[in-house]
Image: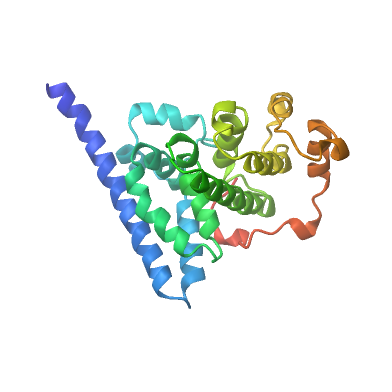
Amino acid sequence: MQRQQEEASPRRRSSAYLNALSLEIEKRLQRALASSSQRRNSLQELFADLALEIDDRAKDIILSREDLISSAEYSVNGRLCFYDVLANYYVRVPLRGKPILDLIVQVWSQSFASHTFALLFHKWLFEVELDHADVLLRYSSALVQGATNVLWIDIQSNARCFQSLFKYLLDEVALEPTRLNKIPVQAQRDLYLLLSRFIFFYNAVEKLESFLKLCPTFPNAILVGGPADIFVTEVADQPASKIKSGASPAALSCSD
């Protein structure tokens, strides 16, 4: 009994901490919604804060031993960010993320809204059951848009702040047909093209063979070729004009 209480106490602390973080995110999104003049700056600051590395003191509060083992798989050089743990939290407690999701939808036309959605809800989309096909279509398109914006920031700054996002989308979605098939076919194609652009940058070449084998069917395959042709075309077709995310690398305090 005493041991159970000792184990429950850290869990309660972690839950309380993550709940407090969620409430703070809600407040900041509400402020952004209420002030059109400060909306962009508010959303940019929130996005940058979500990308911050969690310090050791906060890790001790948030993560159990099992969480530390699990998070190590997706951390980069031991670097774990707030968005990493919050993305997991909204899978475990989907209702806690709903108010945040509703607020993001209301500011969707603003810069950094899609970025924030991708950071917080990339796991939720694939690991929580969503009932309606139109919801899946809307959010899967939003994820590809947001992830594209986020990953370009790493290209611009030559950092890998968001490698855990890329790694999840590659390892746990693109290479896992059960999850990949959860989203509409067009979103699968868009995700494939997105990951193709960044697979070399994030040093995931060893996954390339499996990635190509699981390439979704493209309607114009007769014209553009097979998976390898599509991949090469996407990698090669990256003029400087496409390198745009709406965010300055200086907006982040993350380093490689």
Visible residue check, residue 176: no
| Residue 80 appears left or right of 239 | left
* Quadrant, the C terminus: top right
* Quadrant, the N terminus: top left
Viewer-side residue, 220 vs 190: 220
Above or below for 23 versus 132:
below
Above or below for 165 versus 149:
above
- The picture places residue 117, in percent across and down from the top left corner, at 49, 52
Viewer-side residue, 27 vs 230: 230
* Residue at the image point whose x is 51% and y is 62% from the top: 108
Above or below for 91 versus 107:
above
- The picture places residue 30, in percent across and down from the top left corner, at 37, 66
| Residue 138 appears left or right of 25 | right
* Residue at the image point whose x is 46% and y is 48% from the top: 120
- The picture places residue 210, in percent across and down from the top left corner, at 69, 24
Can you name the residue that lies furthest to the bottom here? 37
- The picture places residue 246, in percent across and down from the top left corner, at 63, 63
| Residue 15 appears left or right of 210 | left
**Quarter of the image where one finds residue 13:** top left
* Residue at the image point whose x is 58% and y is 32% from the top: 181
* Residue at the image point whose x is 17% and y is 22% from the top: 3
Visible residue check, residue 197: yes
Viewer-side residue, 33 vs 119: 33
Can you name the residue that lies furthest to the right here? 223
